Amino acid sequence: MAFSITDAMTDGFSRATERNGLVFVVIFAILAVMNALVVPTGFGPATGAEPASGLVGLVTGLLSFAIGVVTIAAAVVALRTFASDETETIPQEFRRRKLGIATLNAFVGTIVFVLLVAVGSVFLLVPGLFLLVALYYWSVFVAVEDQNFVQAFRSSWALTRGSRLRLFALGFLVVALGILVNATAIVPAVFLGDAAGLVLTQLVAAAVTVYTLATTAQAYDQLRGLEHPLETEPQPGSTGMPA
């Protein structure tokens, strides 16, 4: 049985539009708007108050970093939720179980993952894309199975074996769909003005993020189902074995 791109995308859409999915859309949108508001965008003409501006920049930078960490933690909880059968409520276990360790591994793992893909792309585009697909599901292993990022890279490598071309096609379609959906918000955002436009664009971007996470989790579940179970040694008294 081969990996189904259609099932991953439709199941991901279904999970993203159910109650839990919509809750995560709101959460990611709020975090994105908060980050957009605290990140310095310029303080106007210089007034000679460089120390104050430097302090403001430091504070806003720290706030932005904190929001980024919370966003990673929210992504961990979202992956746990989408990889489960929960659609109406987010279990307390998903919000508490080793969340700090998982967030730290997701943070460090993201940096390592980006560096590995970048190094692969420096030599040729194909090695970079190969590593991107082969290692992509590491984040689910960190979130769902409480692995550290090194173990998760190994697990993703094994999980994607035999399905990497289909997974590349899935990734391409999800990214293309995300770009298209985000683009639809640009024109109305311009007419709505700064504040409303910001909320609209971040809300749409959050919806794309949630769909991507849901599709990733559903693809992970499907790949897990395709894995061949380990053969167990027949026990005495079982069919075909003398007692």
Image (tube, grey):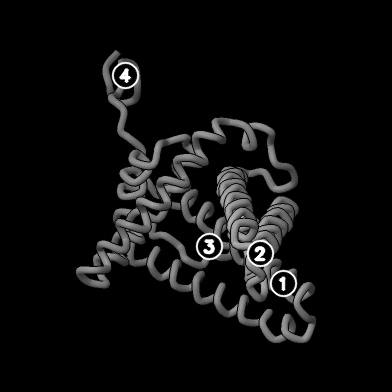
- Density class for disc 2 (Cα within 10 Å; few <14, some 14-19, many ≥20) is some
N-terminal of the two: label 1 or label 3? 3
Q: Secondary structure at mark 2?
A: helix
Q: Which residue is mark 2?
A: 36
Q: Tag 1, which secondary structure? A: helix
Residue at (79% x, 81% y) in the render: 192
Most extreme residue toward the left is 123
Instruction: Please determine whether, in this image, residue 199 is positioned above or below residue 150.
Output: below
User: Badge 4 is on which residue?
Assistant: 235
Q: Residue at x 50, y 56 (%)?
A: 216
Report the Cα–Cα distance between label 1 and label 2.
8 Å
Residue 75 visible, this angle: no
Give the camera-side residue of 49 and 113: 49
The picture quadrant where one finds residue 56 is bottom right
Instruction: Name the residue at 48% across, 56% down.
Output: 219
Mark positioned earlier in the residue sequence (2 or 3): 3
Residue name at image x 73 percent, y 57 percent: 26
| C-alpha gap between disc 1 and disc 3 | 33 Å
Q: Which residue is mark 3?
A: 7
Callout 1–callout 2 Cβ contact below 8 Å:
yes
On residue 198, the disc is: 1
Residue type pointed to by label 4: Gln
- Please tell me which of labels 2 and 4 falls first in the chain: 2
Q: Position of residue 158 (x, y in %)?
A: 31, 47
